[in-house]
Image (cartoon, rainbow, N blue to C red):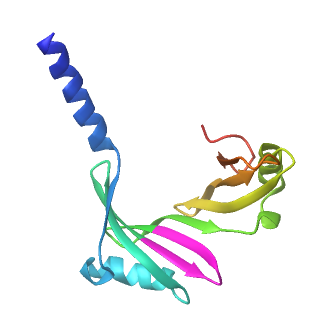
Amino acid sequence: MTRMFCVLGAAFIAASAAYATEKPMKLEAMPPKVQEAIRGEAAGATIKRTLVEVENGKTLYEAETVRDGRTRDFVVDAAGAVVEIEEEIDPASAPAPVKAAFEKAADGGRIGRLERVTRRGTVTAFEGSVVAKNGKKRSLAVKPDGTPTK
């Protein structure tokens, strides 16, 4: 029995280490290449918050920004390369399959917030929320072809 708990405990610790843990970090405390990349990506926007996270053993830096009332969050690696961007978009500008998937999920209600997710320069997903006619809100994530991400 004790052996089983040791095995389960070790598995839990290993699984926990694989998930990202993020902490607030001032921009000025980040490496110079990261600061430069964040300032460049955030040009014309207000930086709301900056974070550091360790994901699968790699240190990544995140900036949450707002421009013209829309959010744009991005992740930069230690070398200063932008690895991911989550950018709020107008649902009307979404590709037709994405818009159709969100409208179907809304079930006669409305599409709430919608973000385009770009990883290493390629649009990989759209994430957002819908509010059904009955007022229930739910989250949704789809690929650019409108199929679920999971």
Q: Residue furthest top?
A: 1
Q: Quarter holding the C terminus?
A: top right
Q: For residue 113: magenta?
A: no
- Horizontally, is 3 left or right of 127 in the view? left
- Residue 134 lies, in percent from the top left, at 79, 46
Q: For residue 67: magenta?
A: yes
Q: Residue furthest right?
A: 108
Q: Nearer the viewer, residue 32 or 71?
A: 71
- Horizontally, is 71 left or right of 50 in the view? right
Q: Nearer the viewer, residue 6 or 83?
A: 6
- Residue 17 lies, in percent from the top left, at 27, 43
In the rendered image, the vertical position of residue 31 relative to residue 140, given as above or below: below
In the rendered image, the vertical position of residue 87 relative to residue 136, given as above or below: below
* Residue occupying image coordinates x 33% and y 70%: 79
Q: Which residues are magenta?
A: 63-74
- Residue 70 lies, in percent from the top left, at 64, 76
Q: Residue furthest front?
A: 134
* Residue occupying image coordinates x 82% and y 50%: 103
Quarter-wise, where is residue 112 in the image? bottom right
